[in-house]
């Protein structure tokens, strides 16, 4: 389904009972974000929110794709898997041998359909250019500030257009933009991104780089800008396929080398000068749930702002999951399963990216296993595939389990896991936002082979059935007073894994504590201990896993222990400890700054509490930040050392 514009999508959401209008004034600085955080963490993602009184001429749309249903509505399908099936059918049709003339003729309608999805540049002006600001001024737009320690307001759903100066090939991506004044923003291009490569090519040519930023229009544009497409594949081809209608583009007014969707709500035109000094951008409360810290990035100078007469400003917040971006990630997980299966990993059956893993940190794959070592083959293929190179923890299961049932998956994984031989470590490129890496953008990776093993993959010395007898938590905490919490609830479910909250006090503390714990007779058969900070409530598994996945560098922070099996000469069992605690210079030799988690400030929480009834959006929802404030270290974006 093709939406005519963002208002068309808003009307569709409203008819479906998926949108709430807020007529009370809400400040774009912190308040909109706090209200959205409360709603988006409601069961199922809450409702989309249209803030109609923002102190500017424009309303703000939040959480518009923040549920499974709204994500499906945005992409015009009943189920996200419908898109994967369409892609798989296309792959099969294109790869099928065309032996007869009838086979070739049968392709013609499909080729015509392909052509109807290709983007097209049209003459004249688009609806996105109905109003041209004579003096472009970003302060006229209700750009939100999400979190108290953000560097300022950020444009959070920008669809950013650049072109390769040598080939003219377009790239459409999404990178946050900090607003510094009415005509200046930062351009947060990570070094791995295509736009950053374009920037470097313009720099080599000593030329200014034209850029256009689109906001609104068909929500498919927003999704396509986030999609992990191969380089040189036009994002508007994907958008055309998803909406089953070509994207019509018009030339920008002040940057005519760049074309943008004619039906967008806003277009911010400008340039980046590669010869200019970089600007200190950030911090920013990011999708990891932690602040990404300030760094040097290019300056974007605004040369024109155009918009529809009835423009709506779309925005999003990211932070401690779940947020709206979880559903954008779910769409990518389902849509790109088919290309991964058809082009790279033919044994792939399914894939899951748990919300606690904030996309790259944790990926679970399910394969049809047919030979020894197949999990490692899949591991190498996945880590070499596009943005999957940023994955930190990969779990490979097989056809005999269900990966969407996390309890059943964990039972299956641990039943077939020898921690000494079935966990593989590597290192390579990591997301720039991964704060756990000792070096920015480069760190450790871990693959857990959760498949049933063939004889070739097993050690004769490893016992198959060791059942933990249970532990005495009080006795362990008495013996090791640095342990502030233990969650052993999984043991009763045949999942031999402990979660332990520790207050570190010395170098190598976690490594030594892990060895001491595994030396105890009652630890026999416990295959994994996950360590987190003492501030984390380990009874809350979702929060514990989120903190653990963010803070772990698997290669650096894993400790395997091997012990003889009592009464079984020649047999050896193994356990692994994984250190998901905060890392410091003093205790860990960690030289980078460590970020704080993202929470609202007390004053904003108080203001929203007081105006909640006037918002008319349903029963009072307390701030999610209240749950996480005890886990902070100080009040700033950077943890004090």
Image (tube, grey):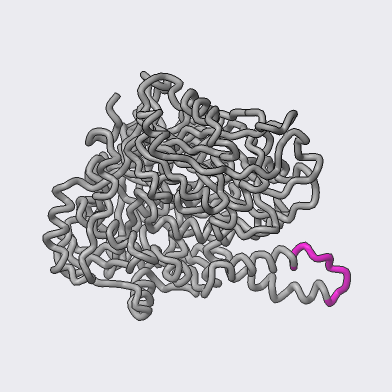
Task: Residue at 55% x, 39% y: name it.
Answer: 528
Residue 262 position by quadrant: bottom left
Task: Residue at 27% x, 72% y: name it.
Answer: 20
Q: Determine the residue located farthest toward the front in the rendered image.
A: 567
Task: Residue at 33% x, 59% y: name it.
Answer: 41
**Residue 372 % position (x, y):** 79, 44
Q: Does residue 19 appear to the left or right of 198 in the view shown?
A: left
Task: Tell me if residue 538 can be seen.
Answer: yes
Q: Determine the residue located farthest toward the right in the rendered image.
A: 99
Residue 296 position by quadrant: top left
Q: Nearer the viewer, residue 131 or 438?
A: 438
Total marks shown come to 0
Q: Nearer the viewer, residue 282 or 456?
A: 456
Does 567 sit above or below residue 270?
above
Give the residues drawn in magenta, as a range.
93-102
Q: Nearer the viewer, residue 170 or 605?
A: 605
Does 280 sit above or below residue 371?
above
Task: Tell me if residue 64 can be seen.
Answer: no
Task: Residue at 73% x, 74% y: name it.
Answer: 108
**Residue 110 % position (x, y):** 69, 73
**Residue 312 % position (x, y):** 29, 65
Query: Magenta stretch containing residue 476, yes or no?
Result: no
- In the rendered view of the protein, which quadrant contains the C terminus? top left
Does 7 sit above or below residue 334?
below
**Residue 165 % position (x, y):** 52, 41
């Amino acid at each position: 389904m093709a939406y005519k514009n963002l208002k068309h999508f808003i009307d569709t959401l409203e008819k479906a009972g998926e949108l709430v209008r807020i007529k009370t004034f809400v400040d774009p600085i912190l308040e909109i974000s706090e209200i959205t955080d409360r709603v988006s963490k409601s069961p199922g993602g809450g409702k989309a929110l249209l803030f109609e009184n923002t102190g500017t001429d424009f309303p703000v749309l939040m959480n518009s794709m923040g549920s499974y249903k709204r994500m499906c509505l945005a992409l015009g399908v009943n189920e996200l898997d419908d898109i994967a099936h369409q892609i798989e059918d296309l792959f099969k049709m294109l790869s099928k041998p065309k032996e007869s003339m009838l086979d070739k003729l049968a392709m013609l309608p499909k080729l015509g359909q392909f052509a109807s999805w290709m983007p097209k540049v049209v003459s004249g002006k688009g609806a996105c250019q109905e109003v041209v600001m004579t003096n472009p001024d970003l302060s006229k737009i209700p750009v939100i500030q999400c979190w108290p320690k953000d560097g300022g307001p950020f444009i959070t759903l920008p669809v950013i257009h650049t072109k390769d100066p040598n080939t003219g090939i377009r790239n459409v991506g999404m990178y946050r933009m900090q607003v510094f004044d009415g005509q200046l923003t930062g351009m947060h291009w990570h070094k791995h991104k295509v736009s950053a490569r374009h920037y470097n090519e313009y720099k080599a040519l000593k030329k200014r780089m034209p850029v256009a930023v689109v906001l609104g229009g068909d929500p498919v544009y927003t999704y396509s800008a986030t999609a992990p497409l191969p380089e040189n594949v036009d994002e508007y081809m994907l958008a055309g396929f998803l909406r089953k209608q070509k994207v019509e583009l018009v030339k920008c007014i002040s940057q005519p080398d760049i074309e943008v969707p004619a039906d967008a709500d806003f277009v911010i035109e400008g340039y980046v000068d590669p010869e200019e000094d970089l600007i200190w951008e950030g911090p920013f409360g990011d999708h990891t749930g932690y602040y990404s810290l300030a760094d040097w990035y290019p300056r974007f100078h605004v040369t024109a702002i155009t918009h529809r007469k009835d423009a709506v400003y779309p925005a999003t917040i990211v932070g401690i999951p779940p947020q709206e971006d979880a559903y954008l990630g779910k769409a990518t997980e389902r849509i790109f399963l088919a290309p991964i299966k058809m082009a790279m990993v033919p044994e792939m059956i399914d894939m899951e990216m748990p919300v606690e893993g904030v996309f790259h940190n944790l990926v679970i794959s399910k394969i049809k296993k047919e030979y020894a070592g197949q999990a490692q083959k899949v591991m190498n293929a996945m880590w070499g595939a596009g943005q999957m190179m940023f994955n930190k923890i990969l779990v490979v299961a097989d056809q005999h389990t269900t990966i969407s049932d996390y309890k059943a998956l964990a039972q299956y994984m641990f039943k077939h896991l020898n921690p000494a031989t079935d966990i593989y470590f590597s290192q390579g490129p990591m997301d720039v936002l991964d704060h756990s890496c000792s070096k920015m953008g480069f760190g450790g990776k871990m693959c857990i082979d959760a498949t049933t093993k063939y004889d070739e993959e097993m050690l004769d010395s490893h016992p198959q059935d060791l059942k933990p007898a249970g532990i005495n938590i009080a006795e362990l905490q008495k013996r090791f007073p640095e342990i502030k919490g233990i969650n052993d609830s999984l043991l009763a479910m045949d999942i031999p894994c402990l979660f332990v909250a520790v207050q570190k006090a010395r170098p190598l503390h976690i490594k030594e504590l892990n060895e001491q714990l595994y030396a105890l007779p009652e630890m026999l058969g416990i295959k994994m201990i996950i360590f987190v900070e003492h501030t984390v409530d380990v009874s809350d598994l979702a929060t514990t896993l989120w903190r653990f996945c963010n803070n772990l560098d698997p290669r650096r922070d894993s400790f395997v222990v091997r012990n003889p099996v009592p009464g079984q000469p020649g047999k050896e069992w193994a356990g692994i400890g994984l250190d998901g605690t905060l890392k410091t210079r003093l205790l860990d030799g960690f030289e980078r700054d460590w970020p704080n988690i993202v929470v609202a400030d007390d004053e904003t929480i108080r203001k929203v509490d007081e105006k909640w009834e006037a918002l008319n959006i349903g029963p009072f929802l307390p701030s999610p930040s209240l749950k996480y404030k005890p886990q902070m270290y100080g009040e700033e974006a950077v943890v004090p050392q």
